[in-house]
Image (cartoon, helix red, strand yellow):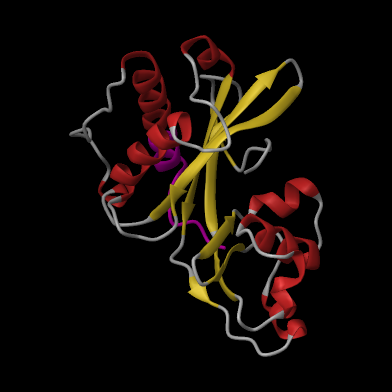
Amino acid sequence: MSHVYSDENGTYLVKLARQTVDGYVTKKIKPEVPDDVPKALTAKSGVFVTLNSVTGEHVELRGCIGRPYPTQPLVEATIDSAVDASTNDPRFPPVTQRELDNILVELSILTPPKKINWSKPKELMDSVKIGRDGLIASRGMWRGLLLPQVPVEWGWDTKQFLEHTCNKAGLPLDAWKDTKTEFMSFQAEIFGEETPKGGILRDPVHARC
């Protein structure tokens, strides 16, 4: 995947997400959109903000929420997702002020999801590339998303990736074999802090949501 966003763009957004998390956790204040936003970050885009908690060499997920579809300007979606990741992830209690110095902030900028057309399980498997694609599985009201970095971090093959995406959607692990289950794929550019409140890297390696 070619890069759409520069390292400077990624640094800007991660710093904005960090500012948002710190400000909302400590004062319940959500920042306004800054006046100096680079033009590239005003276009509508999906984005996810991931928070990881660091204890010594141990890193674990602390919150991850985003907007899968390009319905908001990227800068606005980043602010809203950072608030939600720190306070509204139903898997975790809200982040507390004493945790902030041990939190890593990571951001994934998504391409628009595209439907995968398939009629046989092998066709679906052949359409998915580990390390390139994120997936959304849906059936009726059930829906689940996994970012492209997740199967890489966990060492999954394509079958496991499909199974875990179905599981994230609340569906049986083998629901990916049934054409009633719809899949969409997307790609992401990923930026994140190397250490809590530290330097920002493209494609950092941390725990994933």
Residue 157 magenta-highlighted: no
Q: Percent x, y for residue 87? A: 44, 29
Is residue 141 in view from this perspective? yes
Position of residue 126 relative to residue 39, above or below, is: below
Q: Kindly indicate the quadrant of the structure image that contains residue 56.
A: top right
Screen quadrant of the N terminus: bottom right
**Horizontal relation, residue 67 to residue 130: left or right:** left
Screen quadrant of the C terminus: top right
User: Which residues fall within the magenta stretch?
Assistant: 1-14
Q: Percent x, y for residue 166? A: 67, 63
Q: Percent x, y for residue 178? A: 69, 81
Residue 3 magenta-highlighted: yes
The residue located at (25%, 39%) in the rendering is: 37
Position of residue 166 relative to residue 77, above or below, is: below
The residue located at (62%, 64%) in the rendering is: 133
> Which residue is outermost to the top?
98
Position of residue 136 relative to residue 10, above or below, is: below
Q: Percent x, y for residue 104? A: 57, 26
> Which residue is outermost to the left?
35
